[in-house]
């Protein structure tokens, strides 16, 4: 994975392997509620899958994109190191994912998805404060609002970055144009650098 993409991915997701302290670091650095909800979110029934953008993408026959397709796309958009077959699953779906990725790159998560993630971050922060409150020498320096805003911004940046990377790696029609538009948008600077690098040098993408 390109360095910029790796750093951004590491900012919002990861794996917990070393007990309580790793859980604390995961919550503080990654912004996921308890760091144990990710797998449950991935397996959520269709009605709980977050909206990908402000509009509902449709297929060529005018039907709503199937829940399974949306789950695969969400798993890709939210993966950090993407080592669990997220891109392979995305590739298998082919052109069905193009409009979803284009919408995610242009608009980011839908308001409902942003609100849900904000609540999740607020719960994770309060849980961390509660945990730290009863332990000597454990202080949480960051206030809730800057913590939530920082982690939410990282999540949105990663979400849009993965959308652009997916379009480029799948060689979707109009992918280069969509990415160039994103580079002129309010996309965060680190995500722009990662996308520009893969646009200019396709060999930098680990998924091509």
Image: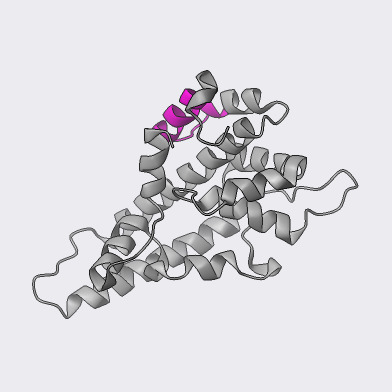
Query: Quarter of the image containing the C terminus?
Result: top right
Looking at this view, is 88 or 194 the one in front?
88
Looking at this view, is 97 or 128 the one in front?
97
**Number of residue marks:** 0
Query: Is 120 colored magenta in this rendering?
Result: no
Residue appearing at x 63%, y 28% in the figure: 178
Percent across and percent down for residue 36 are: 42, 70
The overriding secondary structure of the stretch rendered in magenta is helix
Residue 184 visible in rendering: no
Q: Quadrant of residue 164?
A: top right
Looking at this view, is 142 or 104 the one in front?
104
Q: Which residues are magenta?
A: 182-198
Query: Quarter of the image containing the N terminus?
Result: top left
Percent across and percent down for residue 177 are: 64, 23
Residue 45 visible in rendering: yes
Residue appearing at x 15%, y 66% in the figure: 139
């Amino acid at each position: 994975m390109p360095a910029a993409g790796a750093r951004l991915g590491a900012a919002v997701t990861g794996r917990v392997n070393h007990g309580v302290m790793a859980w604390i670091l995961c919550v503080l650095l990654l912004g996921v509620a308890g760091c144990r909800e990710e797998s449950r979110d991935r397996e959520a029934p269709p009605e709980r899958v977050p909206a990908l953008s402000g509009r509902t993408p449709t297929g060529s026959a005018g039907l709503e994109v199937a829940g399974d397709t949306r789950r695969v796309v969400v798993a890709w958009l939210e993966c950090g190191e993407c080592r669990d077959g997220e891109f392979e699953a995305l590739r298998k779906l082919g052109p069905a994912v193009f409009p979803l990725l284009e919408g995610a790159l242009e608009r980011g998560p839908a308001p409902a998805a942003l609100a849900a993630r904000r609540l999740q971050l607020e719960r994770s922060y309060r849980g961390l404060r509660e945990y730290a409150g009863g332990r000597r020498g454990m202080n949480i320096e960051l206030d809730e609002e800057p913590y939530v805003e920082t982690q939410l911004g990282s999540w949105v940046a990663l979400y849009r970055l993965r959308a652009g990377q997916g379009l480029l790696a799948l060689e979707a029609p109009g992918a280069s144009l969509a990415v160039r538009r994103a580079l002129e948008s309010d996309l965060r600077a680190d995500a722009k650098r990662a996308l520009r690098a893969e646009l200019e040098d396709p060999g930098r993408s680990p998924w091509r």
